[in-house]
Image: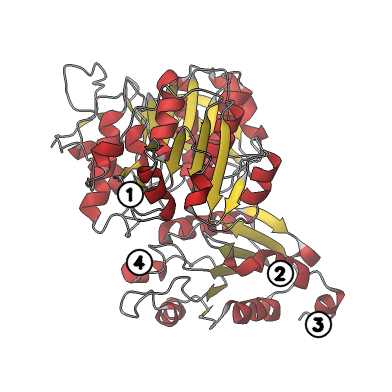
Amino acid sequence: MGGACSITPHQHPDNPHTDSGVKIPIKRPKLALHFKNRYFFRMFNDISHIKPPSTIHLTGICGTGMGALAGLLKQAGYTVTGSDAGAYPPMSDELKRLKIPLFEGYTADNLSHNPDLVVIGNVCRADHVEAVAAREKGLTCASFPQTLSQLFLNSRAPYVVAGTHGKTTTTSLLAFLLDKCGAAPSVLVGGITQDFGAGYKLGDGVPFVVEGDEYDSAYFEKRAKFLSYAPHCAILTSVEHDHIDIYPDRDSYFDAFRSFAELVHPGPLAVYSGDAGCREILETAHVTANVITYGVVNDPFLFEPAWLAKPGGPNQFSLQIEGIHHGTWTTPLAGAHNLRNTLAALILAHRGAGIPIKDLKNALPLFGGIARRQQIVGTPNNITIYDDFAHHPTAVKVTLEALRDKHPKSRIIAAFEPRSATACRKLHQEQYSHSFGEANLALIAPVGRSLPANEALDTAMLADALNRNGVRAIAPTSLEHLQALVEKEVVPGDVVVLFSNGAFGGLHQKLVSALASDKYVEDSH
């Protein structure tokens, strides 16, 4: 197939990229400026005039994204302060290292220094004490994405990674490849990259690689963050209804992604060929960017991928681009899902930034990975303990499949904490019952939020469904009960993976310590 794309974007006079392929009819939606309210236009300020060393205060600074933004602002020369309900590692340690003053607890007094800009985190409602104080004092306020866009992205080329799954890993890998190959990118990602030692980096180059979060922006800007980023080129990994607290139905969630896809210019827009949600976005959005599709051999392709990977030996794959073979590659990442993430990053690095294939091939094996994505936190007595952020049923499933490929002969004990706004609800009750097929034992922790019984995920029911599906499963009554079960069940050679988007009650280090004891070795069965 000729051209860069195996799926034809909308035939539009402004879009020269109309390569032959599957033609898709377009139904153009309205640009999604979701959930507008009475504060939206009054507080959507032009802040581009705020230059270093102006003082910027971040309300809710200990969140992963806000903390990374604080570091980026500090690196750019701004004077940064922040506040949060509670400070805890790793963010508290990072802020201390950066010498950013942190006010623990929210009060109006935290704004007594009259900062030039107050960045209001999306944890704050309109009646939040610091939000009220900022309005009463007449201080300039902005959201996280407004600040990032106007102070950084407007002078660079945003490379935005979006999708329900795989954003953090793909963003980190793309940033690493650009950096290693000399493009000197700036970076903002919702995690700690092993290569940069932080979730941010201010570079001298044109590209700015940013994780495109679909979560809302602020109480006065109730729309997806990524709609503020004006992507020069982008990745769409997958689209599957999530964040039910923000998007109560599937249509509202998909609307945000349709609007995002329409913003990409000139492209490329790299899209996974095996995802039904991605196909729906291309069918119903007015996409003018050059679309480049990708996938892995044996994926359930809905349209032909232009970039195709075939897994080979351990940590190897062969790459084919538009029918032309580009040899065997080595990757440090495990699993078919990470191979798809790798393809997406390679597409933007090569077609977006113009980095030669041979340079990318040399750089890829050196990628250090990302914290909390299949991260080994300890190997006491030959028991491998992983920490993983996965909490959506699809993410849990593909991560366990990757760990099974990596540990084909080991027993896998999977402990899952349903803690996110979506995971703790019944929305995916049935889907979770098919997510743990590669585990030898699934331990379903108590729901991590207080919800009415008719809304909450039924962990006992999920454990029963898993047992019926052939996966041994238990629903412990507490985290202490869960820890005791792991200690009772595990033997040297096993793999333990802890799934949570939170701290999981400190279970990671508790298990590392408990399973390292001599007494445990003596008592193992």
Q: Earlier in the sequence, mark 1 or mark 4?
A: 1
According to the image, label 2 marks what residue? Answer: 510
| Label 3 residue SS | helix
Residue 135 or residue 297, whichever sits in front? 135
Side of 461 relative to 17 (left or right): right
Residues under numbered marks 1 and 4 in contact, where contact means CB atoms less than 8 Å apart: no
Mark-to-mark CA distance, 2 and 4: 29 Å
Colouring scheme, one of rainbow, by chain, secondary structure, one colour:
secondary structure
Choose mark 3 or mark 2, whichever is in front: 2
Q: Which of marks 3 and 1 is nearer the N terminus?
A: 1
Mark-to-mark CA distance, 1 and 2: 38 Å
The residue carrying pointer 3 sits among few (fewer than 14), some (14 to 19) or many (20 or more) residues within 10 Å by Cα, namely few
The residue carrying pointer 1 sits among few (fewer than 14), some (14 to 19) or many (20 or more) residues within 10 Å by Cα, namely many
What label sits on residue 523 in the rendered view? 3
According to the image, label 4 marks what residue? Answer: 428
Q: Which of marks 2 and 4 is nearer the N terminus?
A: 4
Mark-to-mark CA distance, 3 and 2: 18 Å
Q: Which of marks 4 and 3 is nearer the N terminus?
A: 4
Choose mark 4 or mark 3, whichever is in front: 4
